[in-house]
Amino acid sequence: MRVFIVHAHPEPHSFNGALTRAATEALSETGHEVVVSDLYSAGFNPVSDRRNFLTVHDSKVFRQQAEEAHAAAHDGFAPDLVAEMDKLFWCDALILQFPLWWFGLPAILKGWVDRVFASGGRIYGGGKWYDRGVFRGRRAMCSVTVGGTSSMYSEQGLNGPITDILFPINHGMLYFTGFTVIEPFLVHAPARMTDEERTAVLVRYRERIMSLATASTVTYERLADYDEHYVLKSTQKP
């Protein structure tokens, strides 16, 4: 299996760093291929603008999707984006490794998605979305550290269900581009854990990494389940 890890934490000695190292070691030791994009270490630029492109579609008004479509048709993406896109097309499984910050992705990782997940047919567009997406047949998983306890992110918890918080990522980014979404690997309050507890989590993570091809997935509706207005057919009155 070929696994692409996008790592988004500024501190190498963080628990996020430990998780990425554990995944990389487990995969390498068992003969799998793994590539890591360490966004902070690489100094990845998260700002999406004209620097995304070598080509220009409209020099007067910047419309990102129009520029992306033009770049896709004329090999016009900047080299740093081409490198990340190539890793996506290379991999069988994608892992987003990040801490939950303000109920979402760290800015550098959101910027990576903004820039790399380009429209115009390269990553999506032209009818290529959701279960008809470019990356159908490939798998993706969020590995997330969360500052609060699991009870805080439950149905009755103060912060609401973690599934709702991750929905824009799992559904709106990963499934949208065609990935089959693996159930997220969640680590709650790692800073409050003992060394023994953190070690146990790393053991569990290695086990999850070794089962990426068969791990449980999140089920989402197919495009065929919606009508022409993108309303679920099952919710409509006969």
Image: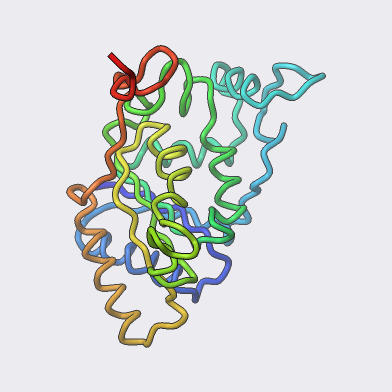
| 201 horizontally vs 123: left or right | left
Q: How many marks?
A: 0
Picture coordinates of residue 78 (x, y %)?
A: 62, 34
The residue lying furthest to the left in this view is 214
Left or right: where does residue 160 sit relative to residue 181? right
Rendering coords of residue 11 (x, y %): 55, 71
Left or right? Give the position of 218 relative to 12: left
Residue at (44%, 37%) from the top-left corner? 86
Q: Quadrant of residue 15?
A: bottom left
The one nearer the camera, 106 or 219, is 219
Q: Residue drawn 33% across and 19% down?
A: 236
- Of residue 50 and residue 163, the one placed in the foreground of this image is 163
Q: Residue at coordinates 49% horizontally, 65% vertically from top-left?
A: 158
Residue 184: image quadrant is: bottom left
Give the quarter of the image for residue 162.
Answer: bottom left
Q: Tell which residue pokes out farthest to the right in this image.
A: 60
Structure colour scheme? rainbow
Q: Residue at x 30, y 51 (%)?
A: 183
> Residue 140, image x and y in percent?
34, 45
In the depicted structure, whether residue 27 falls above or below residue 213: below
